[in-house]
Amino acid sequence: MQINIPRGTQDILPGEVEKWQYIEKKLKEICDRFQYNEIRTPIFEHTELFLRSVGDTTDIVQKEMYTFEDRGERSLTLRPEGTASVVRSFVENKMHGYASQPIKLYYLGPMFRYERPQAGRFRQFVQFGVEAIGSNDPAIDAEVMALAYTVYESMGLSKLKLVVNSLGDKESRTAHRDALIGHFKPSIGEFCRDCQNRLEKNPMRILDCKKDREHPLMKTAPSILEYLNEDSRQYFEKVQKYLTALNIPFVVDSNLVRGLDYYKHTAFEIMSEAEGFGAITTLCGGGRYDGLTEDIGGPAAPGIGFAMSIERLLASLKAENIELPLDKQVDVYLVSLGEEAKDYTVGLLNTLRKAGLSAERDYLNRKIKAQFKAADRIHAKYVAVLGEDELQNNKINVKSLETGEQKEIEIAKLVDALKDFAAF
Ligand code: ATP
Ligand code: MG
């Protein structure tokens, strides 16, 4: 019986993988410009880490984790997101003591969630994310949002919507929490079981419920913005002022909540407004968190970050009909005629590759016409043709497949010719 790929995962084949490589390179460039450094953490962590940081009222912890026991009877979990690991590493490596502050990190790698697979939702997906830990300057909130926005913009996307909200500080949230409980409690029987559980534990998460989205009480729920105290209000104003200074368009939406307990002040999402993008419009989500470092046994440190998946980025590129400028050309294809010439191309190919050129030859004993076809298929810029006669005279025939121009040159000058055809 044939064995197929697990549900919710995908193979990324040549032809598609070049897009991923392009995006990965671009992400690294952008992080360099914004001065975020890469961190690589393990694919699995102690389950306890996610229970404590992501929180046990979330969908991730309640329904989506790939948890297993290893042979040493430890409970481990394939990471469902990146922030927990980064913050664990921050604490474990005592980064709060580093000379250079704040700590600005980015990560890129696979995450695992047991979800119902659908467009834009996989069981293994690749997240890119950043975390800035150690500063509560609202300017860094704006910087983090600007970085996320720049990623999408630099790929050529234009139908973007940055939605921002403030969840306030602890005092504001407590006041809002009481108001939410008062609002939902009398009719909580009309809501789903998850929401009923959330009412006392984390009523803000009710606003994020996917099942009860249409309930009339959702629209009339008290807005967090009305409960912000003076500090929180000023913080939010600064964030908006800095976004404006950075020339980043945004809208404020008081219904945007990120459900985790540790979120405070800034919360944001970037959506795609491209037609036909589908039901899931969120490309990226993030926000400011507090107390996360303490939850996993470290000193207090404020942080802000976001995460986006490459899968949704690719989907948004498709929705906006954007072709990434991929350069997958091969410099030269060696075409040979006759046994001796064929043998000779083994060494010649090696010389070309050692000189830094991308080069290929025939391995299927093809006729000359088929070799030209093969060169075409891999988008070779040049074809270098070697027959018995040329070989006798230490010559080779170089043809540009772009212009059709041909030149016979000395074999010893092939590398130079390929680097600057016009000079020959
Ligand atoms: P959603 O409401 O869509 O389930 P989420 O709140 O679970 O999103 P986060 O945990 O904030 O998402 O993850 C940040 C980003 O990671 C999302 O905005 C999305 O781009 C991406 N993402 C999350 N889950 C998946 C998935 N299963 N497949 C692909 N991308 C995902
Ligand atoms: Mg989810």
Image (cartoon, rainbow, N blue to C red):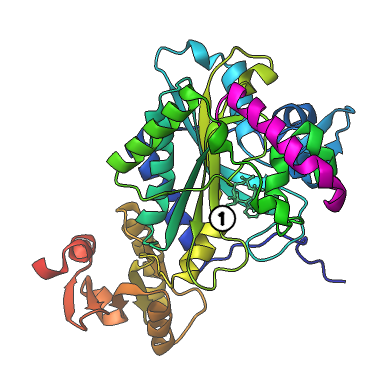
Vertical relation: 414 (above or below) 262? below
Q: Is residue 107 above or below residue 314?
A: above
In depth, the one of 118 and 8 nearer the eye is 118
**In this picture, residue 126 sits left or right of residue 165:** right
Image vertical order of residue 48 relative to residue 192, above or below: above
Residue 65 shown left or right of residue 362 in the figure: right
Judge by depth and name the residue closer to the eye, 136 or 357.
136
Along the line of sight, which residue is nearer the eye, 116 or 336? 116
The span picked out in magenta is: 167-193
Residue 413 location (% of width, % of height): 18, 63
Disc 1: which residue: 282
The secondary structure type at the circle numbered 1 is: strand
Query: 179 or 390: nearer the eye?
Result: 179
Q: Position of residue 166 (x, y in %)?
A: 52, 36
Residue at 53% across / 54% down in the picture?
283
Q: What x and y, as percent, mark residue 54?
A: 70, 34
Residue beneath the point at 18% across and 81% down: 405
Name the quarter where the N terminus is drawn.
Answer: bottom right
Q: How many marks?
A: 1
Instruction: State whether label 1 is within 8 Å of ligand 1.
Output: yes
Residue 424 visible within the image: no
Viewed as shown, does residue 63 lie left or right of 260? right
- Residue 114 screen position, x and y as percent: 78, 51
Q: Is residue 408 visible?
A: yes
Say if 239 sits above or below 387 in the image: above
Q: Residue at x 65, y 49 (%)?
A: 220
Q: Amino acid at mark 1?
A: Thr
Residue 258: say if magenta.
Answer: no
User: Residue sitting at 72 percent across and 51 percent down?
Assistant: 217
